[in-house]
Amino acid sequence: MDAHVLKELTYEDFQFVYQPIYALNSWETLGFEALLRTAFAKGQIEELFSLARRHNYLYKLDTMAIEGAVKHFPFDVLKSEDVFINVFPSTLLHPHFQLFLTYLLNTYKNAKHRIVWELNETLHEKILWESPALFARVMILKEAGFKIAIDDFGAGAAAMRQVSMYEPHYMKLDRSYAEGLADCKQKKDLIDLLVNYYPHTNLILEGVERDKDLAAAISLNLHAAQGYLLGMPQSISSYLTYNKYRSLFRRERLLNS
């Protein structure tokens, strides 16, 4: 993608899909992670953001993605599920972010207290994790009623020290923890350590694709899980339609049982 195309992108060029996150103790839908899609970067969203970073357009693209994710999420229909939205630390630290946040909540009033900010762990912004300014901004968000998640733990910039410092509501374990979990004692031991070391942080296992790895996650008392096995990223309307017919099917079975 050329840089000039980047600056011509509008909201009409974006599509948003949502992947469900399930609580493992109840099988209730805890929330949905919002994921950006665009025809200009099919399967290469990370490249799109990398290009934006190189051309000093990252804040604009990130806030456009945030607003789109909020705009397309049916808060009035899904009344208890939160929407997990990725955000770069540099976006949180941008001098205009507070104004953007005020605009976002004034425009989409149902989003208040329903957004979980997933702090993106890109190594490009590793130095920002040590910034007192980032810590202060995250504390302000928490005090305002927002939940915080650290994304891709184990693969990015954040380490155990940052988790202890930021005390996020959620810590999302990188998909590498899920791959072959059922067959790997070392991964099980590490997850068990994390579960016990952070008793007040809800751990979410990403990238679950096998039944036996999901069973292992449940046995390790992980709070929640996300992955293709549990639900593909899809438009929220597709999810609502599927959920409607699943509920009708269950009701029919109960009536006929």
Image: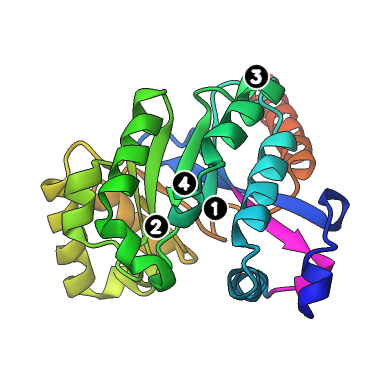
84 or 206, nearer to the observer:
84
Q: How far apart, in angstroms, are the residues tagged by discs 4 and 2?
A: 34 Å
Q: Position of residue 207 (x, y in %)?
A: 47, 64
Q: Is residue 95 visible?
A: yes
Callout 1, which amino acid?
Leu
Question: As displayed, is residue 34 above or below residue 209?
Answer: above
Q: Nearer the viewer, mark 3 or mark 2?
A: 3
Q: Check disc 2: other Cα within 10 Å, few if <14, some if 14-19, many if 20+.
A: many
Chain part drawn in magenta: 34-43
- Inter-mark Cα distance, 1 to 3: 30 Å
Per the model, the C-alpha gap separating discs 3 and 4 is 20 Å
| Quadrant assignment, res 199 | top left
Question: What amino acid type should be assigned to the residue bearing mark 3?
Answer: Lys
Residue holding disc 2: 214
Which residue does the numbered mark 4 point to in the structure image? 92
Mark 1 or 4, nearer chain start:
4
Q: Is residue 94 within the magenta segment?
A: no
